[in-house]
């Protein structure tokens, strides 16, 4: 019986992406796999107390056990709040006359 599973760990920056294939014990957690992978040495900016992690696009906790074929994703912190960015973009559209001041929709053609 095989006591290991194959997983991937990925982390992406705008200018550099890392994808590490790794074989880990069957009882391995997300945190253990990240630490075993060496990705923390490649990307010292990763702080597991700050960066969120996921498995195949779904956020997960560091103590989550892994399954064969899982891909752990380490997410970068957001540099801007998406809600604030959208509010600013909407306000700019209203100021430029590209959106209705009341509804926020496109103004009717006259």
Image (cartoon, grey):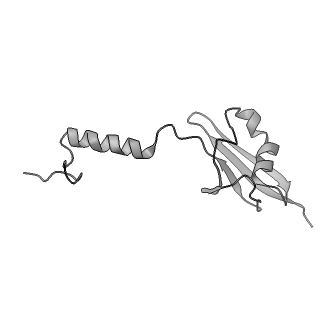
Please report the residue visible at 32 percent of the width from the left and 41 percent of the height from the top.
Answer: 89
Outermost residue toward the bottom? 1
Total labels drawn: 0
Percent x, y for residue 43?
A: 70, 34
Please report the residue visible at 79 percent of the width from the left and 43 percent of the height from the top.
Answer: 35
Q: In this view, does 50 lie to the left or right of 32?
A: left
Q: Quadrant of residue 42?
A: top right
Percent x, y for residue 72?
A: 69, 52
Outermost residue toward the left? 110
Q: Nearer the viewer, residue 38 or 101?
A: 101
Percent x, y for residue 60?
A: 66, 56
In the displayed structure, would residue 52 be above or below residue 42? below
Q: In which quarter of the image is residue 98?
A: top left
Q: Nearer the viewer, residue 29 or 71?
A: 29
Q: Is residue 15 left or right of residue 25?
A: left
Percent x, y for residue 15?
A: 58, 33
Outermost residue toward the right? 1
Please report the residue visible at 68 percent of the width from the left and 37 percent of the height from the top.
Answer: 46
Please report the residue visible at 79 percent of the width from the left and 55 percent of the height from the top.
Answer: 29
Q: In this view, does 91 lie to the left or right of 107?
A: right
Report the quarter where the N terminus lies.
bottom right
């Amino acid at each position: 019986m095989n006591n290991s599973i194959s997983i991937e760990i990925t982390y992406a920056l705008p200018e550099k992406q890392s994808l590490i294939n790794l074989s880990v014990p069957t009882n391995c957690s997300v945190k253990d796999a990240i630490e075993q992978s060496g990705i923390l040495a490649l990307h010292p900016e990763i702080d597991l107390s700050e960066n969120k992690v996921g498995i195949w696009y779904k956020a997960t906790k560091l103590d989550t056990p892994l399954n064969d074929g899982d891909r752990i994703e380490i997410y970068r912190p957001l540099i801007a709040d998406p809600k604030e960015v959208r509010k600013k973009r909407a306000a700019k559209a209203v100021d430029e006359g590209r959106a209705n001041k009341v509804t926020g929709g496109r103004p009717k053609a006259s």
